[in-house]
Image (tube, rainbow, N blue to C red):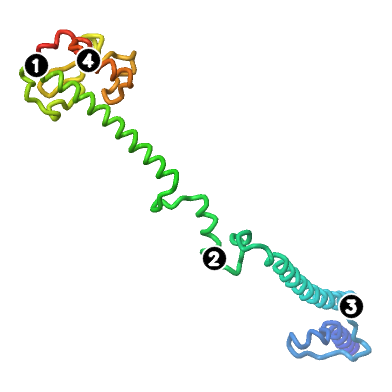
């Protein structure tokens, strides 16, 4: 019995010796018993790997510092070579100018300011005004010719003014006659214009110079039937 207990105690001591951690782990774990330096063994692979990691981290830090220095030198060198150029070439990309000026300046050459009149808008508005005046003048001249002739030929219109010669479109039925639209005076006196196919009626203010000349000749000759719709002459 005594022999077996002695063997069991020896085995338990040997087992505890192998369970004791390394000295590096004593600082992180609970305080335990340490082996003598002669029995202490550290794997060589782990220590070598740790040394390699430390050396690689140091080399990366050194490389980062060198690369940042190189980038700064490249930026300074690039700016030194660009600042001698004219400002108009650098204005969209000049970082030393205010951001609003650098961004808005190229847009001004593309987008027109609606509050400022440009050459194109002024030209188009001028042409539009000229065209409108030309149309109005031709329409007024036509009305004056008609009024002068109608005063002489129609007793009810002897005292008519230019306001009585205001023309309006009187649409007829689609199948009543071949002329779908008529010009009529406010008093009911009307005349028709030739219908150009299915394009509808051509406005009086859009008559050509030749058409106005033919109308003038017809009025001067007294032949009102050339411009008045037949059958409506006495209305």
Q: Which residue is mark 1?
A: 154
Residue 195 placement, left or right of 118: left
How far apart marks 3 and 4 lie (CA) works out to 116 Å
User: Secondary structure under badge 1?
Assistant: loop
* Residue placed most toward the observer, 76 or 109: 109
Closer to viewer: mark 3 or mark 4 = 4
Question: Are the residues tagged 3 and 1 within 8 Å (C-beta)?
Answer: no
| Residue at which label 3 appears | 43
Left or right of 201 on screen, residue 70: right
Secondary structure state at the residue bearing disc 4: strand
* In the image: residue 143, left or right of residue 12: left
Residue 12, image x, y percentages: 84, 85
Q: Could you give the CA–CA distance between mark 1 and mark 4, rounded to whole angstroms?
A: 18 Å
Closest to the observer: 123 or 6?
A: 123
Q: Quadrant location of residue 170?
A: top left
Earlier along the polypeptide chain: callout 3 or callout 4?
Answer: 3
Q: Which residue is mark 2?
A: 99
Label 4: how many residues lie within 10 Å, few (<14), some (14-19) or many (20+)? many
Tell me which residue sits at (78%, 90%) in the image: 32
């Amino acid at each position: 019995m005594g022999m077996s207990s002695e063997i069991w105690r020896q085995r338990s001591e040997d087992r505890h010796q192998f369970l004791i951690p390394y000295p590096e782990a004593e600082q992180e774990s609970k305080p335990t018993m340490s082996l003598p330096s002669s029995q202490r063994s550290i794997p060589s692979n782990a220590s070598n790997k740790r040394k390699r990691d430390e050396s690689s981290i140091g080399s990366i830090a050194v490389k980062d510092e060198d690369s940042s220095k190189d980038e700064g030198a490249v930026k300074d060198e690039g700016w030194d070579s660009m600042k001698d150029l004219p400002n108009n070439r650098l204005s969209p990309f000049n970082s030393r100018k205010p951001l609003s000026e650098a961004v808005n300046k190229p847009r001004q050459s593309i987008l027109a300011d609606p509050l400022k009149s440009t050459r194109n808008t002024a030209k188009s508005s001028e042409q539009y005004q000229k065209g409108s005046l030309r149309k109005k003048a031709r329409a007024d001249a036509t009305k004056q010719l008609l009024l002068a002739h109608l005063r002489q030929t129609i007793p009810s219109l002897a005292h008519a003014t230019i306001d009585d010669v205001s023309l309006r479109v009187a649409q007829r039925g689609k199948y009543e006659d071949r002329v779908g639209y008529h010009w009529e005076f406010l008093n009911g006196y009307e005349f028709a214009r030739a219908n150009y196919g299915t394009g509808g009626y051509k406005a009086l203010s859009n008559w050509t110079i030749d058409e106005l000349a033919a109308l003038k000749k017809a009025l001067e000759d007294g032949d009102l039937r050339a411009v008045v719709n037949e059958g409506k002459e006495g209305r």
